[in-house]
Amino acid sequence: MKKVLIITYYWPPSGGAGVQRWLKFAKYLPQYGWEPVVLTVDTDYAAYPVIDTSLEKDVPESVKVYRTKATDWFRLYRSDKSKIPSGGFATNKDNSLRGKVSRFIRGNFFIPDPRRGWNRFAIRKAIEIINNEGINNIITTSPPHSTQLIGLRLKKLFPHLKWIADLRDPWTGIYYYKLFYPTIISKAIDKSLEKAVLNKADVITTVSPSLGKHFEFRAPGINDKIKIISNGYDESDFENIPASNPGRFTISYTGTISEAYPIDGFIKGVREVIESGNEITISFTGHIPEFQKNKFNSLPGKDIINFLPYSDHATVVRQMLSSSVQLLILPKVPDNKCFLQGKLFEYIASGKPILCLGPVDGDTAEILKQGSFGACLDYDDSEGIASFISKSIAEEYRGGKTPPGQFSRRALSGNIAQLLS
């Protein structure tokens, strides 16, 4: 069986969608003749925003996992590690002087990101693994985008390697990039690193068509090597967990709702549904700031809102299957048409109708429309939101659709295997 070295900062017990992407690929790649070898950071040295030990059960016993030390640069400008961001400052716009200074330090002294403190350890270990394991294929996945610099270095040292650079999010084009106050010099350095990765990698994989076009714009001439490998769902996560009737009509949301997530139109639509005599519950699992909670708590009636803390993946799947409607909100930021959140595909796999708030001409809207999995409505379309909920209550939108096979983690792993060949 041929071997492939997967280099990823996030790996169990770290939680989050980024972990699941390559965890699931590592799980299924052996079925296509590839033996994954994983290089990641030692848990004691990692700066993980969330922990989910339930994901460890998905790591195949046959997969070798190498862990190394790392320098945690976050400690230099964040005293509270619980506030460490997973991808940036998307949910934390601290406009105090301290917050602005910390972001300036982040954007100008740690390019492309503070997790590059892992790189020198990872490069040294990767060289050892490549030589000892007879590796001819490597995959680097980001964010953090500093991980791509490991691939860049290894490609220079071992020109024969086939290097797949997997970029799940924009790099210098990410919507919160300006919050780091990068100087002209910092921007130039960061863009140069991004362009070098895009040009030197043998294959670029990313999660959506629009994001693929985004990277093509960053490095013209690379369109032939850009391949779309979406996120997906793992059938095994839904086995032996039957879809249940919640009793009371329940709308569920999983994830973060920061100030970049407009909710006023949704609240107005829900209010209309409630005032029409319908009893509903809205359940949120994840991080929601107090000012957003206060908006939801303004809805009339008792037992309307249920706030739950971040939960492990298995618990989240059970919550999905016990809901009536899945709520998906995309942040209202530039380039959000390219967003294809990982939970979209698990929402689809749950078989429950999906109400999405976001760009009606984006990649998410297109998938929902093609598969008749739900609807994507504008953030302010309170009438459309109320109509969707009311029709769902009347069971005009029914769940139970068979999710498309091309979005299964098993099938997507086959696509990765073809790129490795």
Image (cartoon, rainbow, N blue to C red):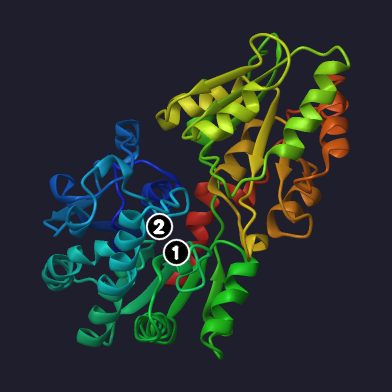
Q: In front here: 208 or 4? A: 208
* Element type where label 1 sits in the image: helix
Q: Quadrant of residue 41?
A: bottom left
Q: In front here: 22 or 262? A: 262
Neighbour class for label 1 at 10 Å: few (<14), some, many (≥20)? some
Quarter placement of the N terminus: bottom left
Q: Position of residue 315 (x, y in %)?
A: 45, 24
Q: Position of residue 113 (x, y in %)?
A: 31, 66
What residue sits 65% from the left and 54% below the top? 332
What residue sits 30% from the left and 55% below the top? 98
Neighbour class for label 2 at 10 Å: few (<14), some, many (≥20)? some
* Amino acid type assigned to the residue bearing label 2 in the image: Gly
Q: Which mark is residue 88?
A: 2
Q: In front here: 263 or 362? A: 263
* Residue 401 visible: no
Q: How many marks?
A: 2
Q: Quadrant of residue 227?
A: bottom right
Q: In front here: 150 or 73? A: 73
Q: Position of residue 28 (x, y in %)?
A: 42, 49
* Element type where label 2 sits in the image: loop
* Amino acid type assigned to the residue bearing label 1 in the image: Leu
What residue sits 18% from the left and 45% below the top? 43
